Image (spheres, grey):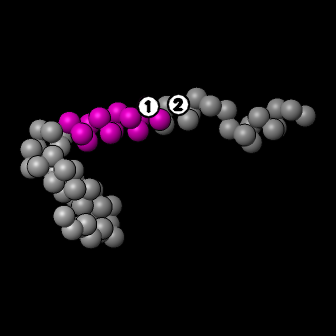
Amino acid sequence: MAEPARAATPAGAVESVMQEVLAFCQGDAMNALRVALIANAFLEAEIDRLNAEPSSGRARSNLG
């Protein structure tokens, strides 16, 4: 399967990724949506985890 060209715009990039997910799911839109929602939940959890960690800059400034 040929790799689709990535679009330069954010909307084009989303379209490109969604086409890849849809192809991966063999055209099944429900499964493609499920994959997208699972990926989104993972990324939201990762953002929450990273926001909960103190930054190394803050940790250094509290030492002195």
Percent from the top left, x then y, of residue 29?
Answer: 10, 44
Of residue 10 and residue 30, the one placed in the foreground of this image is: 30
The three-letter code of the residue at mark 1 reads Ala
Asked if the stretch drawn in magenta spans residue 29, the answer is: no
- What residue lies at 25% left-to-right and 66% top-to-bottom? 3
Image quarter where the N terminus lies is bottom left
Image quarter where the C terminus lies is top right
The dominant secondary structure in magenta is: helix
Residue at which label 1 appears: 45
- What residue lies at 47% left-to-right and 35% top-to-bottom? 46
- What residue lies at 17% left-to-right and 43% top-to-bottom? 32
Percent from the top left, x then y, of residue 26?
Answer: 11, 49
Question: Which range is magenta?
Answer: 34-46
Residue at which label 2 appears: 49
Percent from the top left, x then y, of residue 45?
Answer: 44, 31
Label 1–label 2 contact, CB within 8 A: yes
**SS at circle 1:** helix
Q: Can residue 11 be seen in this view?
A: no
Whole-Å distance between the Cαs marked 1 and 2? 6 Å
Of residue 60 and residue 23, the one placed in the foreground of this image is: 23
Q: Is residue 58 visible?
A: yes
**SS at circle 2:** helix
The three-letter code of the residue at mark 2 reads Arg
User: Which of the 4 quarters of the picture holds residue 63?
Assistant: top right
